Amino acid sequence: MSRQKNRGPVRTAATSPFDDARNELFQHIMSCGVIGALPEHQTEWFNETMQYFSERYHELSKQQIADLRVLGERFAAPPVRKSATADAVSAA
């Protein structure tokens, strides 16, 4: 039987600044209680957080910051449930 050679540590691909910012934003959303907050509180939180992220990740463009906010707002939104009428239409 042959033994497997030790190939060393597994190297992962470097992530982009946008990926890092997105992952950090999702972690902030989960830890700060944004999910389930009132819409006006979420808006205020996202305004302040996007300002912070634009300073922290200065290499991101304004469009990327806007895209990051859209992803964050979708992540923090409650799941969409099908209505009874949509269920009836899909059953027909």
Image (spheres, grey):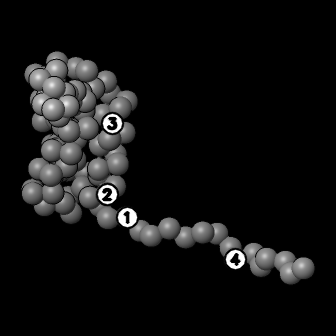
Q: CA distance from mark 1 to mark 2?
A: 6 Å
Say what amino acid the circle numbered 4 marks: Arg
Q: Residues within 10 Å of mark 4 (few under 14, many from 20)?
A: few
Q: Position of residue 10 (x, y in %)?
A: 60, 69
Q: Which residue is mark 3?
A: 28
Decide which of 27, 60 is in the foreground and name it.
27
Q: Earlier along the polypeptide chain: callout 2 or callout 3?
A: 2
Residue 1 x, y percent position in the rendering: 90, 79
Mark 3 or mark 1: whose residue is earlier in sequence: 1
Residue 64's spot in the image, x, y percent? 15, 57
- Give how far apart the Cα atoms at labels 2 and 3 are: 14 Å
Q: Are marks 1 and 2 in contact (CB under 8 Å)?
A: yes
Residue at the top extreme, as displayed: 38
**Which numbered mark, 4 or 3, is in the foreground of this view?**
4
Cα separation between marks 3 and 1: 19 Å
Seen as rendered, the residue at the extreme right is: 1
Tag 2: Cα neighbours inside 10 Å, few (<14), some, or many (≥20)? few
The residue under label 1 is 15
Location of mark 2 (residue): 19
Residue position for label 4: 7
CB atoms of marks 4 and 3 within 8 Å: no
What is the x, y in percent for residue 75? 26, 38
> Distance of mark 4 from mark 2, alpha carbons?
28 Å
